[in-house]
Image: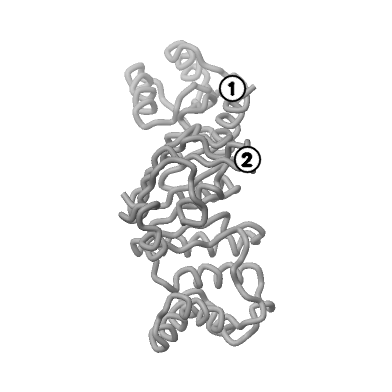
Amino acid sequence: MTITATGLRKSFGDKVVLDGIDLTVDRGTIFALLGPNGAGKTTTVNILSTLLRPDAGTALVDGHDLAADPDGVRAAIGVTGQFSAVDNLLTGAENLKLMADLHHLDRATGRRRATELLHRFGLTEAATKPASTYSGGMRRRLDLAMTLIGDPKVIFLDEPTTGLDPRSRRDMWQIVRDLVAGGVTILLTTQYLDEADELADRIAVLDHGRLVAEGTPDELKRQIPGGHVSLRFPDVPSFESAVRVLGPVTPDPETLTVRVPGDGSVRSLKALLDRLDQAAIEVGDLSVHTPDLDDVFLTFTETEKAAAR
């Protein structure tokens, strides 16, 4: 495991921001932390990156104890926050050189790392231009390049694509995938549910300082009611036979389709098709409809809100 946290708690005055959360993030994976504004996502990142001390709880990051060895944690991680760390008065190359100096890299190593990262992030042509002239996507790429100057094993990305246009967001997604393919572990917070669905190996939903759900994207979707399989039949006899065989379904005689409740899993789909095959009923077309992460987010955060009342 690259990150393990147990019972993290944090309050600001009488406001409880984290109420005893547990996290486990496997090495070389992307773990997404979702939640509404004020849920505690950024506080979690700030604690795990040593920017805040928890009031209670323990954590290990890349084998380093958060309380006993904060310097070891800092040496192993990189952080890209909600707000860019880029200095607008410096060029792209100068921003990277500054970060190399902060990491105490010698001049030759720092220059080599900066050149490599400028090329990797498509910033070579803009390297000598002031960062103030960069587009939003270029600034975000430079920000992440600055995070990578120290070759971190764990990267915290706190809402990394906020404000980016769709193309720039997809460019950033590919960069994140490439980092993980190279062995980096990423803990990602985001407001964009499609981003978590696209990138994350596992997702946790945080609300009112508590983890209210955790699993793979598919596991979380299967927990939400409303999933179904839509079957279209080639003729009326097949349609009517299917309605009789399948039991409680929602039939549509005009389109010869039948909607069958299901969780979208391979097992349930196979069982459904086996029943039709045993009855010698031919299916013309099939589609599986499962809840998306919007449904997951709304269901679990609304449940937590109701429980808090």
Residue at image x 39%, y 31%? Answer: 265
Precedes in sequence: disc 2 or disc 1: 2
Q: Position of residue 158 (x, y in %)?
A: 55, 55
Q: Of residues 97 and 27, which is closer to you in this image? A: 97
Q: Of residues 90 and 241, which is closer to you in this image? A: 90
Point out which mark residue 307 bears: 1
Amino acid under label 2? Gly
Q: Position of residue 97 (x, y in %)?
A: 50, 82
Quadrant where the image shows the C terminus = top right
Point out which mark residue 80 bears: none
Q: Of residues 70 and 266, which is closer to you in this image? A: 70
Q: Is residue 2 above or below residue 277?
A: below
Q: How many marks?
A: 2
Q: Position of residue 210 (x, y in %)?
A: 52, 34
- Position of 107 with respect to 162 (left or right) is left
Q: Which residue is mark 2?
A: 13
- Position of 189 with respect to 179 (left or right) is right
Residue at image x 66%, y 59%? Answer: 163
